[in-house]
């Protein structure tokens, strides 16, 4: 057991010690939500503009790197942002992230070549990688755990809005204006987010302690993550899974992860404290979110392929067909978040939600080809509502189980592993689809229907195996959720700052 240090830097300060007013909380939430929206929108708005960018810059071969490099850098730096915010405060690190993101956006808009655009996207990812995790951490600073679940709906709403608005807005800008406007719009949005965050976060309680940054551990973690994500991004698409480049990347990543684990044991103050990962609540909650959210990300990536290749609808119609899957998570998160504040056994609703998600996904696997499109849409809505109930519980229980001065590290770690889980499951789904359709190497999904028709492959059957894999992913999430200890949620912010938590 560890009690919080009673030194001044460990105490909540930046205010008189009383709880923030509702108006102050709303102002702070407005600032962090806008910053979070910046990062979330930039992951979706680029997709529909990629062909236009490739044509105008005269480089279609390296087009996928525009997406890949952002994923690599934003995922790799997430734990680092958490650690820095625990050391130096949320406000300064959040403002730094916004500035880096805006500078990266300007560099992207001015990029004259594909190489410079890719490098600029990497810089943009370094800025955007911490915004989402920091937003969740800041909410945890100002709202006690018992009430925190109801605020998770804001995060779900941001992701739903960006997922629906991004592709439409990106396509419109690329077609009617110029692709660089996709990045220029981040300038006014970023300035507004900076101004609101600069003012509103002054009242933010502060729990930071002086920490020694483990630079070697940070380098090892970033390197291990980048190498692993390269293997997952390229495997089965750019190179066959059994090829020397992919096997070499996987082996290299394994060595780097082993070195990072050794560094965690030997460093005086490791980047991710062992007490955070050894905490059974944090461990089970992170794994439950990793497989649940990872499976959801995999479905959002491959369902459009299913709609176009199996159902025969257009790209724009497939985007609209995803709305039930996106919107349902907000409904589920709202129900779960509000329930957490009122009941003792808050795991019951997400347990039932995952069981429902598994059952309805099973219907898609068994009867997907014979179901009408309307029925499929209803099933997707039910799946996403069930999954949405998991998200507030896993995040709030993670934050509830650690001391306030470790909140940023724990939240950053949770988001980091969720991103890794998404990349891993997307790779599995991709292997199933490409392997089942007889595609390999640098083959494109655009040729999926044509190749399948020539070879006589039943794509509906191929996607049945994707849905079976999704059931397994939801099942693993359920298993870890059931193993999660249901600790009482702290209901008072001052008591939360003084709470005794397990290592």
Image: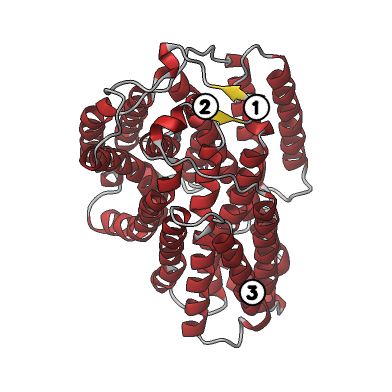
Tags 3 and 2 touching, CB below 8 Å: no
Residue 6 x %, y %: 47, 15
Q: CA distance from mark 3 to mark 2?
A: 37 Å
Identify the residue position indicated by label 2 in the image.
Answer: 406
What residue lies at 74% left-to-right and 38% top-to-bottom? 250
**Tag of residue 275:** 1
What residue lies at 70% left-to-right and 50% top-to-bottom? 483
User: Quick one: label 1 or label 2, which is nearer the N terminus?
Assistant: 1
What residue lies at 64% left-to-right and 61% top-to-bottom? 474
Foreground mark, 3 or 2, reads 2
Q: CA distance from mark 3 to mark 1?
A: 36 Å
Tags 1 and 2 touching, CB below 8 Å: yes
What residue lies at 26% left-to-right and 25% top-to-bottom? 202
Quarter in which the N terminus is drawn: top right
Q: Residues within 10 Å of mark 1 (few under 14, many from 20)?
A: few
Quadrant assignment, res 465: bottom right
On the question of residue 233 being in view, the answer is: no
**Tag of residue 213:** none
Residue 226 x %, y %: 60, 34
Identify the residue position indicated by label 3 in the image.
Answer: 359
């Amino acid at each position: 057991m560890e009690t919080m240090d009673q030194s001044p830097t460990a105490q909540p300060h930046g205010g008189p010690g009383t709880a923030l007013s509702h108006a102050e909380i709303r102002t702070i939430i407005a600032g962090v939500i806008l910053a979070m929206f910046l990062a979330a929108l930039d992951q979706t708005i680029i997709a529909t503009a990629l062909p236009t960018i490739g044509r105008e810059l005269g480089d279609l071969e390296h087009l996928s790197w525009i997406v890949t490099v952002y994923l690599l850098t934003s995922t790799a730096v997430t734990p680092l942002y958490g650690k820095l915010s625990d050391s130096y405060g949320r406000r300064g690190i959040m403002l730094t992230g916004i500035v880096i993101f805006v500078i990266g956006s300007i560099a992207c808009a001015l990029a004259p070549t594909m190489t410079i655009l890719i490098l600029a996207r990497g810089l943009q990812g370094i800025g955007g990688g911490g915004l989402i995790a920091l937003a969740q951490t800041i909410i945890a600073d100002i709202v006690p755990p018992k009430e925190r679940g109801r605020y998770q709906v804001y995060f779900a709403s941001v992701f739903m809005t960006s997922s629906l608005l991004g592709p439409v807005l990106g396509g419109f800008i690329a077609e009617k204006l110029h692709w660089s406007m996709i990045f220029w719009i981040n300038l006014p949005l970023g300035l507004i987010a900076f101004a609101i965050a600069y003012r509103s976060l002054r009242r933010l309680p502060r729990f930071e302690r002086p920490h020694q940054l483990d630079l070697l551990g940070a380098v090892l973690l970033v390197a291990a993550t980048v190498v692993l994500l390269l293997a997952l991004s390229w495997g089965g698409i750019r190179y066959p899974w059994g090829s020397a480049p992919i096997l070499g990347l996987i082996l290299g990543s394994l060595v780097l992860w082993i070195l990072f684990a050794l560094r965690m044991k030997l460093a005086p103050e490791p980047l991710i404290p062992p007490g955070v990962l050894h905490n059974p609540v944090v461990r089970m909650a992170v794994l439950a979110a990793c497989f649940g959210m990872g499976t959801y990300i995999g479905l959002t990536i491959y369902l459009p392929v299913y709609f176009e290749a199996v159902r025969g609808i257009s790209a724009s119609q497939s985007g609209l067909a995803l709305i039930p899957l996106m919107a349902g998570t907000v409904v589920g998160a709202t129900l779960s978040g509000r329930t957490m504040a009122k009941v003792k056994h808050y795991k019951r609703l997400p347990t039932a939600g995952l069981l429902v998600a598994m059952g309805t996904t099973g219907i898609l696997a068994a009867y997907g080809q014979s179901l009408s499109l309307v029925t499929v849409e209803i099933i997707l809505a039910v799946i996403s509502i069930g999954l949405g109930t998991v998200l507030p519980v896993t995040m709030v229980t993670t934050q509830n189980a650690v001391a306030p001065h470790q909140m940023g590290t724990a939240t950053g770690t949770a988001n980091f592993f969720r991103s890794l889980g998404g990349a891993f499951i997307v790779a599995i789904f991709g292997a199933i689809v490409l392997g089942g359709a007889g595609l390999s190497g640098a083959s494109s999904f655009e040729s999926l229907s044509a190749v399948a028709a020539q070879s006589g492959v039943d794509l509906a059957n191929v996607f049945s195996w994707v849905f079976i894999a999704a059931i397994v992913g939801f099942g693993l999430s359920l298993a870890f959720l059931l193993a999660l200890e249901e600790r009482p949620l702290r209901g008072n912010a001052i008591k939360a700052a003084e709470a005794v938590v397990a290592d």
